[in-house]
Image: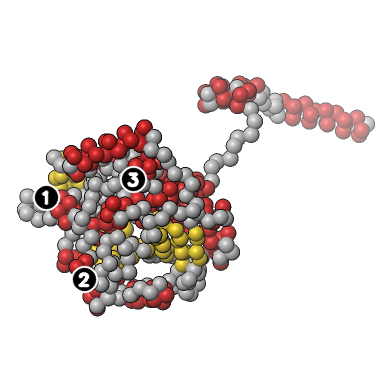
Amino acid sequence: MKLQIAILLCALLGLVLGRLEPPPPDHRNDLNSSYALFNATYPKDWLSPDFAGDTPPPEDPDEKIWRKAVCRGEKLLKAMVLDEIDSSVLLSWPYTQSPWDGPMHDELVKWGYNDDEELHDEYQHLCHFQDRFQNARRALEAMGVDWRSTEVGGDNECFALFHYNGPNVKLDNNGRMPAVRHQRYDADGREYRVTGGHAKIGINRRSGIVHYIDRYSAESAAAHTWGVPAEYVQSEDLPKLRSSSDLAWALWNRHRDSSSSRDPGIKAINNFIAWHIVNTDTADVIVRRILTRRGALYGMPDPWPGHDVIAGSDDDQEAEDAAALIGSPNGIGPAYFLTQHKRQLGCAKFIWKIKIWADDPRYKGEDVLEPNLTFYVDGSCTTPSWSSAKLGRSGQGREREMQRAGERRGGEDKRREFVREHVIWGRGGGGIDVGFKDGR
């Protein structure tokens, strides 16, 4: 009897629970809505069999920077050793000879620069390398170079050019200099904004050295000063006189000892030194990759004598490393200096070696040591043995030669309408990556 009662209770309980428990959900509606959402979100051709297969991995940004530097460096290395006609053909330029020459006092003022002698004097301490850079004196003495500035009787003279507060900048209604972001000037019949860029460059004509101490390119500075993304900075809104090679050439032509018997003249260029490089593409990608391959701690440079990289080396990897350094943001300035001024320099001179080193011998951490790059110039006026890519004077080359002759007859101002840009590229859209632009 008890068993029958228990069975009856269980049956009644099951009946009650069956009525209270909801039925399982019908997922057919969910599937339909998900499919509709899928179709609405993605293009239909995405479902095509043509899209089947593995998705390729995204391109490594560091590898992209490296490849661009190598390609540019290889082209610039060839352009340095070729004559004007052939280098123009190689680079697809109307001409390689720079339209800017001489000390450029008037030209710099016209294009919005503050180029003041008293201002230059304020920055002479930058060229007293014992005070500014640890262990730099040892390196310069090893090169046989004076480490002192001209203010204490040395050979190194510093110049500071600022693209703001110049005498050609328009004053406000109260006759005062506006804030940098509001400064404007007139040149070639139109109004321009100052960029806020600068170039601090040292010149040692006695030893034939250009010191790149601190540069802030017009492209990068304009983006910051104008408050716009870098890709919105248009080249036509920038000063035509802005590349670091042209600015360095102006200062190379005005060194105070230019009339001294100690001065060998403008043809005697031996080295370019880029001090304390902070450009991330150069320091964190290109230099670090080269030194990591060579077993350097953290990919960091050693103190002088550092690491030598030979251009045109029989070792393919070393030759590629040299090309990457020449094509880096800090290498294109020296390369253009030589490529654009072959007439004044007397012949085709080229970079044959790059030394990577640090002036501070103490390791303090992975991101502390900023590399220096010393570029060595071959001034023998002989074609290097590795240069086998001599371009013939084709019909195109002869046409360019005739065009150049016509440009010379038409005057320098006409040639300046063509502005050559050295481009500094950066990660994440932070740089300008069309052709060859310069700056930093």
Q: Residues within 10 Å of mark 2 (few under 14, many from 20)?
A: few
Q: Amino acid at mark 3?
A: Glu
**Measured Cα–Cα span from mark 3 to mark 2:** 31 Å
Three-letter amino acid code at the position of disc 1:
Lys
Residue 371 x, y percent position in the rendering: 44, 64
Q: Nearer the viewer, mark 3 or mark 1?
A: 3
Residue position marked by numbered label 2 in the rendering? 260
Q: In terms of sequence position, does the residue under pointer 3 or pointer 1 come before the other?
A: 3
Q: Is residue 209 left or right of residue 192?
A: right
Binning the other alpha carbons within 10 Å of mark 3 as few (below 14), some (14 to 19) or many (20 upward) gives many
Is residue 356 or residue 409 the one in the foreground?
Answer: 409
What residue do we see at 21% from left, 41% from top? 408
Q: Please tell me which residue is depicted at 21% across the width and 62% down the height of the picture.
A: 254
Asked which quadrant contains residue 27, the reply is top right
Name the residue furthest left: 174
* Residue 86 position (above or below residue 209): above
Of mark 3 and mark 2, the one earlier in the sequence is 3
Labelled pair 3, 1 in contact (Cβ < 8 Å): no
Query: Left of 209 or right of it: where is 5?
Result: right
Q: Which quarter shows the C terminus?
A: bottom left
Q: Is residue 210 visible?
A: no
Tell me which residue sits at (87%, 33%) in the image: 6
What's the distance in space between the residues labelled 3 and 1, CA to CA?
Answer: 39 Å
x then y, percent, for residue 188: 15, 42
Tag 2: amino acid? Ser
Mark 1, Cα crowd under 10 Å, few <14 / some 14-19 / many 20+, is some
* Residue 91 numbered mark, or none: none
Instruction: Return the mark for residue 84.
Output: 3
Q: State the mark number for residue 170.
A: 1
Instruction: Examine the rendered structure and indicate whether residue 434 appears above or below residue 141.
Output: above
Q: Is 151 placed above or below 41 here?
A: below
